[in-house]
Amino acid sequence: MRTRMQERDGHRIRWVLVVAVAPGLWLAPVVSHAKGKRGGDATPFATLRLYEVQEGTDLKGNPLHPAMRLANAALVGKASGGVCTAGQDPCDFDTTATSQVPFDKGVGPIQGDFQVLFDTMLNPGHLLSDLVLKAKGSIDGTLDLRQLLGGTQPLAFIDGRWKSKDLGVRGTFTGTFFVPTTTIPTDPGASDPCPDTHFAYFDPSSGLQCLVSTEFSLGRPVTKVVATFLKTGTIGPGDDDDEDGPGKN
């Protein structure tokens, strides 16, 4: 994990660089109506709100001036819309992804696989062991860390293509990573805008949004991802799907 310090309005803002994939409910990316690869208009299909619960980062090159950021991450959360095929909406959704971002560019490829899960509700505590796989899919796109690495804003962006043979659908996606920043003031006389959790996400349209207790994992604030899946076409039996990337789903 790497941190960057910045003074802003008397508050010390620590930007925790724990970004990775995949992919709104809170600050949804703008939905476009681009033409799909199979000739149809892109239409809204699903929205995602995920939290990054694990990331491993490897910095390649000179330890003082690394050239490449390699990362793998796991995100879990909820989806709503067309991916929820088991009668539960919102439904559970998780994804794992890998990314490669050169520091001199700040932009690089990202690939991953996702799962749509059904909650059997066999246990009142809704344990992870009660989630049953209903569909799989994959994503292939671009991760943009330029604002985060440059210290401009605690945000990162993704876009690309997704597909799921289980769902019989293909499309495009856009998403935003919201990286937690500490709100503890450096001025002893200043007040903390988030006194309950001491962390916030930065929303460009409305400023800081305080984290709630459920946006922590083992006591650590987690990066939030909100994303939109658009549908551009279908996948039928016997379709040659190689053009959509390396994923098999």
Image (spheres, rainbow, N blue to C red):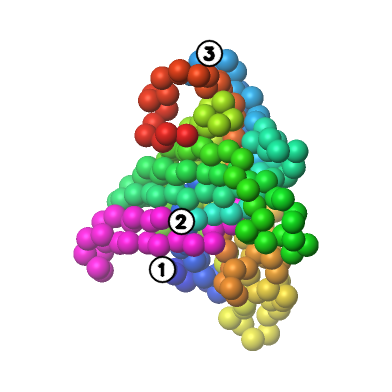
Q: Residue furthest top?
A: 39
Distance CA(mark 1)–CA(mark 3): 44 Å
Q: Nearer the viewer, mark 2 or mark 3?
A: 2
Look at mark 2 in the image and give the residue it sits on.
73
Residue 196 screen position, x and y as percent: 72, 75
Three-letter code for the amino acid on which mark 2 is drawn: Ala
User: Does 73 sit left or right of 181 as displayed?
Assistant: left
Distance CA(mark 2)–CA(mark 1): 15 Å
Residue visible at 58% across and 38% down in the picture: 135
Q: Earlier in the sequence, mark 1 or mark 3?
A: 1
Look at mark 3 in the image and give the residue it sits on.
39
- Can residue 42 be seen in the rendering of this structure? yes
Residue visible at 41% across and 44% down in the picture: 110
Disc 1 packing (10 Å; few <14; some 14–19; many ≥20): few
Look at mark 1 in the image and give the residue it sits on.
2
When asked about the image quadrant of residue 194, the answer is bottom right
As helix, strand or loop, the secondary structure at mark 2 comes to strand
Three-letter code for the amino acid on which mark 3 is drawn: Gly
Q: Is residue 108 above or below residue 124?
A: above
As helix, strand or loop, the secondary structure at mark 3 comes to loop
Distance CA(mark 2)–CA(mark 3): 33 Å
Q: Earlier in the sequence, mark 2 or mark 1?
A: 1
Q: Nearer the viewer, mark 2 or mark 1?
A: 2
Residue 53 screen position, x and y as percent: 54, 62
User: Which residues make up the magenta segment?
Assistant: 48-73
Q: Main secondary structure of the magenta part?
A: strand
Residue 29 screen position, x and y as percent: 61, 39
User: Does 165 sit left or right of 9 as displayed?
Assistant: left
